[in-house]
Image (spheres, rainbow, N blue to C red):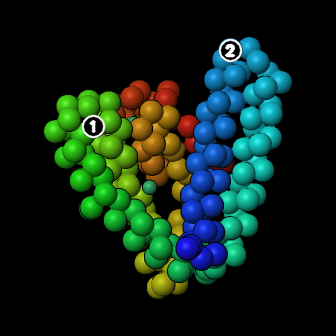
Amino acid sequence: MTNSVENLKNAFAGESQANRRYLAFAKKAEDEGFIQIAKLFRAAAEAETIHALNHLRILGEIKTTSENLAAAVSGETFEFKKMYPEYLNIAKKEKNTQATWSFDVANKVEQVHAGLFSKVLEALKTNKELPKVDYFICGVCGNTVEGSAPEKCPICGAPRAKFFKVA
Ligand SMILES: [Fe+2]
Ligand SMILES: [Fe+2]
């Protein structure tokens, strides 16, 4: 028998995945010329996000920003120190080159995220003013770069044109 806390956690994971899955399906529907169906996928994706956020709020997992930053650092650190290295080993053993690539770039980017979050958390703790910077994301590997987009992504090699600025 599961309890409601466990169920909220599972439902949060499932709704979060449904959100990203429907957005991917919407993109595919658009590519295939199904504009109305794309819109329905995007509508359902928005609704799944609301469900996910309701579950997360009720779980009490949205805390103060400083606590949230600490949670982010520990999540990212777990991913690049433990989870992805294990996944990478298995993917390499299986000679699954696509999974190896996907885990490898994610692993490297999570390390970047841990660093960015730590830096901001430190500044927040010491009341240092945070410099206003823009963030650029590599559309291929998710690399997250402060300041300006690099000529070439240092993680996946994609050209500058693949980067987009976070609003
Ligand atoms: Fe990350
Ligand atoms: Fe990249």
Question: Whole-percent x and y of residue 101?
Answer: 30, 35
Q: Which residue is pictured at 76% across the width and 47% down the height? A: 46
Question: Who is closer to the viewer here, 141 or 120?
Answer: 141
- Look at the image and tell me in which quarter the N terminus lies: bottom right
Question: In the image, what residue type sits under mark 1?
Answer: Thr
Question: Whole-percent x and y of residue 68?
Answer: 54, 74
Q: Earlier in the sequence, mark 1 or mark 2?
A: 2
- Element carrying mark 1: helix
Vertical position of residue 123 compared to residue 111: above or below: below
Q: For disc 1, does the CB lie below 8 Å from ligand 2?
A: no
Ligand 1 quadrant?
Answer: bottom left
Q: Residue furthest top?
A: 33
Question: Whole-percent x and y of residue 96?
Answer: 26, 31
Left or right: where 156 falls relative to 89: right
Left or right: where 10 falls relative to 97: right
Question: In the image, what residue type sits under mark 2?
Answer: Glu
Residue under label 2, please give it. Answer: 32
Residue under label 1, please give it. Answer: 100
Q: Which residue is pictured at 66% across the width and 37% down the height? A: 23
Q: Residue furthest left?
A: 93
- Element carrying mark 2: loop
Q: Which residue is pictured at 66% across the width and 38% down the height? A: 22
Vertical position of residue 126 compared to residue 41: above or below: below
User: How many residues crowd mark 2 within 10 Å: few (<14), some (14–19), many (20+)?
Assistant: few
Left or right: where 127 falls relative to 35: left
Mark yes or no: residue 23 visible.
yes
Among the 4 quarters of the image, the one containing residue 26: top right
